[in-house]
């Protein structure tokens, strides 16, 4: 089975087109080398894919006949992604909370235009 189809079948990508584009961009590695979307996958192959700033590491158990339900995905792959990768994503989420929330702090240019427009309408 093609690697892009396999990643779509085990629900790492929503569509085959997205999986194909990820392979073309070099975000998917098969056995340590960047792979084309048409590269075949066999049991015991190791896949690394970068998605949402996390590097997932998978081992292929079996080839699914077609797209499988979320509960059956574990039959076809073993996820060996380290927990540190998910913790790094959580830290990134917390760092985004540092930025100003809407309605707090100094107004932005858009806020200022809205305020000026509000006062002009009353006059």
Image (cartoon, grey):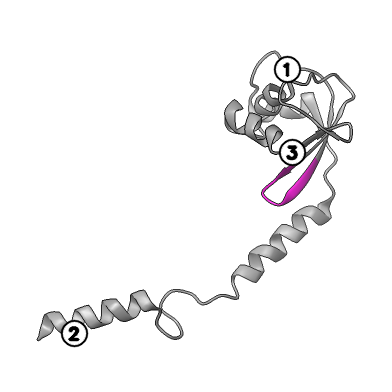
Question: Is residue 90 depicted above or below 116 in this figure?
Answer: above
Is residue 67 toward the left or the right of residue 102 in the image?
right
Instruction: Return the residue at label 3.
Output: 26
User: Mark 2 falls on what kind of element?
Assistant: helix
Which-is-in-front pick, marks 1 and 2? 2
Question: Is residue 52 depicted above or below 71 in this figure?
Answer: below
Question: Which of the pair 64/30 is nearer the observer?
Answer: 30
Instruction: Return the residue at label 2.
Output: 119
Q: Place residue 114 in its image quadrant.
A: bottom left
The Cα–Cα distance between marks 1 and 2, rounded to whole angstroms, is: 63 Å
Magenta range is: 50-56
Q: Where is residue 57 in the image (x, y as percent from the top left)?
A: 82, 40
Residue 94 numbered tag: none
Q: Which quadrant: the C terminus?
A: bottom left
Magenta-colored stretch includes residue 53 = yes
Badge 3 or badge 2: first in the primary sequence: 3
Q: Position of residue 71 (x, y in %)?
A: 68, 29
Which-is-in-front pick, marks 3 and 2? 3
The 10 Å Cα crowd at callout 2, few under 14, some 14 to 19, many 20 or more, is: few
The Cα–Cα distance between marks 3 and 2, rounded to whole angstroms, is: 53 Å
Is residue 42 toward the left or the right of residue 27 in the image?
right
Which-is-in-front pick, marks 3 and 1? 3
């Amino acid at each position: 089975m093609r690697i892009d189809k396999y990643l779509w079948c085990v629900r790492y990508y929503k569509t085959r087109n997205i999986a194909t584009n990820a392979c073309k961009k070099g975000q998917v590695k098969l056995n340590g080398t960047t792979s084309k979307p048409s590269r075949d996958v066999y049991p015991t192959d190791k896949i690394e894919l970068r998605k949402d700033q996390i590097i997932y590491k998978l081992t292929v158990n079996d080839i699914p006949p077609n797209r499988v339900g979320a509960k059956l995905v574990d039959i076809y792959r073993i996820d060996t992604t380290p927990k540190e990768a998910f913790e790094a994503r959580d830290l990134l989420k917390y760092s985004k909370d540092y930025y100003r929330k809407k309605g707090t702090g100094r107004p932005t240019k858009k806020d200022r235009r809205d305020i000026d427009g509000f006062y002009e309408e009353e006059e």
